[in-house]
Amino acid sequence: MSSKETRKLVPTAPARRTCAVAILALSASLVVMEYLVPSSAAAADTLGGHAKQGQAIFRQRCAACHNKQPGDTSPFGPPNLNGIFRGTSPLTAKEAARIIEDGKPPMPAFGSVLSRSDIDDLIAYLKSR
Ligand code: HEC
């Protein structure tokens, strides 16, 4: 192998420096974004990524009907979704996904407006409550 070929394989110093600068700039902007994105509730800060996404979707699409607080056992109105995956007759994630997708009259179906990953996020959020 000639020395010319060897040189081609090893990144030149300026190229390496550019790369390092790019990585630094990228991580700096990620840190800045972390601070700029407002968190809507203090409680949301403790949620993981999926649950946090799910919370946003829940507030937009579900909370108008499913607004019962934990412990509310009132028989009126849409069911309380707090703790639906726990207790004596818990729902499975699969059952919940089917209900969200297909609806359960009078609850509308969300299969055409929510993606599979939106529904997974919602379930992650409901599991956190
Ligand atoms: C228009 C009001 C309405 C909206 C909006 C709504 N739901 Fe419902 N949901 C209901 C009602 C009413 C029921 C009970 C249906 C039944 O069992 O007869 C229900 C049932 C459910 C159940 C089953 C609960 C159980 O214990 O069996 C789940 C899970 C659920 N909804 C999740 C959601 C999610 C997630 C969203 C948002 C994507 C949502 N719902 C949006 C009204 C609504």
Image: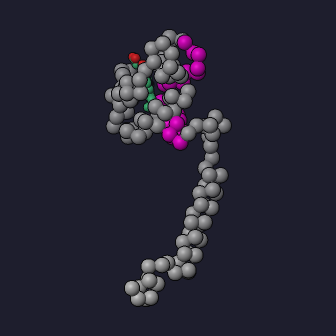
- Which quarter shows the C terminus? top right
Seen in the picture, residue 30 relative to 109 is either above or below; the reply is below
Seen in the picture, residue 121 relative to 28 is either above or below; the reply is above
Question: Measuring 37% from the left and 24% from the top, which residue is drawn there?
Answer: 95
On screen, residue 56 versus residue 1, left or right, reads right
Tell me which segment is drawn in magenta: 49-73
Q: Write down the quadrant of residue 92 in the picture.
A: top left
Seen in the picture, residue 19 relative to 114 is either above or below; the reply is below
- Residue 4 image position (x, y, % from top left): 43, 88
In this rendered view, identify the residue nearer to me: 91 or 101: 91
- Which quarter shows the N terminus? bottom left
In this rendered view, identify the residue nearer to me: 100 or 86: 86
- Residue 88 image position (x, y, % from top left): 48, 12
- Residue 15 image position (x, y, % from top left): 52, 78
Q: Is residue 12 visible?
A: yes
Magenta-drawn stretch contains 67: yes
Q: Is residue 109 visible?
A: no
- Residue 9 image position (x, y, % from top left): 44, 79
Question: Measuring 62% from the left and 61% from the top, which residue is drawn there?
Answer: 28
